[in-house]
Amino acid sequence: MSDLPEGWEYAPIGALCNLINGRAFKPQEWSNSGLPIIRIQNLNNPEAKFNFFSGQLESKHHVRDGDLLFAWSGTPGTSFGAHIWNRGDAALNQHIFKIEFPDSDIDRDFLRYAINQKLDELIGSAQGGVGLRHVTKGTFEKTEIAFPPLTEQTRIAAKLEELLTQVDNLKARMDGIPALLNRFRQSVLTTAVSGRLTEEWRSQNPSHPPISTKDLNKAWADTYRLQGKKYKEMDLLPGGLGYTLPPSWVETKVGEVFDVYVGATPSRENTEFWGGPIPWVSSSEVAFCRINNTRESITEAGYHSASTVVHPSGTVMLAMIGQGKTRGQPAILSIEACHNQNTAALRVHPDYCKSEYLYYYLCERYEETRRLGSGNNQQALNKKAVQSLPFPLPPLSEQSEIVCRIEKLFSLVDQLEKKVNEAKTRIDRLTQSILAKAFRGELVPQDPNEEPASLILERIRAQHVAAPKPKRGRKTLK
C-alpha cells in the first residue's frame, strides 16, 4: 500500500523529462562577447564572472529564461542542485543538465523543489572522491520523486516559496550575528587597552601608582646579570599609541617592558636534530590560542645547533611572517618551548605585567600589527619592529582586573555564539523538515476532484512514445 496521499504517485525523474547535457567548451573558444557560458559557479553565485562564446552553438545547448537546469558535478554542499535560469540567453556548459518536460503537466517550480529535496540521496550515490563527485545520468533518471496532481503541484510550490523565503531571511539574519559578535569582542579589547573598561574600577581603587619604567629596566638588567649576560639598551623606532591613557598608566614600548627573542630552525637535512624532547613552535601554531603542545620537536643536538632559546610557560608568542592571516597573530605558551625564526617570543616579567594582558593587547592591535609588517616585496615583521610596538602599561592590579573582565565578557559571547550555531543547525533542519512535509502531502490540502497523477503520467508516457527520436541539433550562429 502506498504511503502517498490519494491521487499521488511515485515517478522516476527520467519518466518525466528529457535531459540534455551541456557542451564542453574549450578555453580557446572563449571570447569577450557573445553568449555567456553557464558554468556551475554561475548557478550558485550571482557574482561569478562569465566566459563568453561567439561561435556556432547547437540549439539544444541554448538556454533561455525559465529553463530548468541541474548541476550534477562538483563539491557536495556547494555545487549540486536544480535552478531556474533567469539571466537571459546563454550557452550551456558541461556538467549541467537542461531539463525539458511538458509544462502543461508539470509545474516548473514544483519539479525544482522535488529534485532538490532528493539532493542528499543523489549526492550519496554520486561517483568520485570526497572533493569532486558527479551524479550520472542513469542515477538521476532512476531517482524517484513523489508526484501529485498538477494544481496541487502549483499549490505546493507556492507554499514552499513562501515558507522557504522566510527561512532564508532568518538564515541571513543569523549569518550576520557572528560578525556582530566579533565586532563586540574587538570593542571590548579596544576599551580594555585604552583604560575605558576599568574606568569605574580605578575610581574605586585609586591607590595604584604608575609602574616605573626605570624600575622595570633595572629588573630586566638584574635578570640578565644573574644569567651572566649584559642587558643592552635598545634603539627603538618612533611612534605612539595615538590616544591618551589614564594618569596611572604609562605609554611605553614592547621592547621596554618585555624581553623579545627571535627563534631559529635547526637544519632540516640533519635527521638527528628532529624528533627529540624539546617542543618547537612554528608560526602556523601561533594562532590566537594557548599552545599546549607542538607539531614538531627537536633534540638537544638540534637545540645547540641553532640560535633558538627555550622559553618558560607564560611567554607570549607573535607570528612575524606568514601568508594569509598568520602574520600578527599572538599566542601564549602553556609549556616550555623554543621556536622558529618566523616568530617572536616576548618574555614577561611577572612583577610588572601579566601574560594575558599582553596577549589581549596584541589581539586588539592585530590588524595594525599586520599593516606594520606589510611591504612590497616581503610581508614580515622583525625584532626591532616588534620591540618598537607602542604599549599601554597599567598597574599590575589593574591588568588583572582587565583580564578578568575581558574573559567574563568573552565567555558570555562564546555562550551566545554557541546558541547561535545551535539555532542555525535547527534552521537548516527546518528547511529539510518543510520539504519532507511537502512531499508527504502534508503541506497543502488535497482536492479529490483533481486529475490524479496516474493519468498525468500515462499522458507523459504516451507523449514520450509518440515523440520522434531526437536528431542531432542544428548549429545556429550566435
Image (cartoon, rainbow, N blue to C red):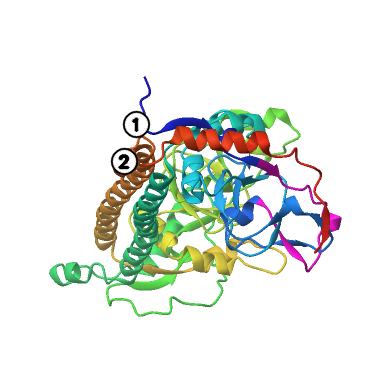
Of residue 344 and residue 21, the one placed in the foreground of this image is 21
Amino acid type shown at disc 1: Glu
Q: Quadrant of residue 97?
A: top right
In the image, taking residue 191 as reference, residue 472 lies left or right, namely right
Q: Residue at x 42, y 71 (%)?
A: 252
Q: What quarter of the picture does the N terminus occupy?
A: top left
Q: Quadrant of residue 232?
A: bottom right
Q: Which residue is mark 1?
A: 6
355 within the magenta span: no
Amino acid type shown at disc 2: Gln
- Residue 86 appears anywhere in the view: yes
Q: Return the x and y of residue 9 as percentages of the image width and height.
A: 44, 31
Of residue 325 and residue 369, the one placed in the foreground of this image is 325
Q: What quarter of the picture does the C terminus occupy?
A: bottom right
Q: Which residue is mark 2?
A: 446
Q: For the view shown, which residue lies furthest in the top direction?
A: 1
Q: Return the x and y of residue 407 as percentages of the image width and height.
A: 28, 53
Of residue 154 and residue 192, the one placed in the foreground of this image is 154
Q: Return the x and y of residue 261 as percentages of the image width and height.
A: 55, 53
What's the magenta region? 19-39
> Vertically, is 391 above or below 284?
below
Label pair 2/1, CB-CB below 8 angstroms? yes
Q: Residue at x 57, y 71 (%)?
A: 235
Q: Secondary structure at mark 1?
A: loop
**Mark 1 surroundings within 10 Å by alpha-carbon count, few (fewer than 14), some (14 through 19), many (20 or more):** some
Q: Secondary structure at mark 2?
A: loop
> Vertically, is 45 above or below 128?
below
In the image, taking residue 315 as reference, residue 471 lies left or right, namely right
Cα separation between marks 2 and 1 = 8 Å
- Residue 118 appears anywhere in the view: no
* Lower position in the chain sequence, tag 2 or tag 1: 1
Q: Return the x and y of residue 413 as percentages of the image width and height.
A: 29, 54
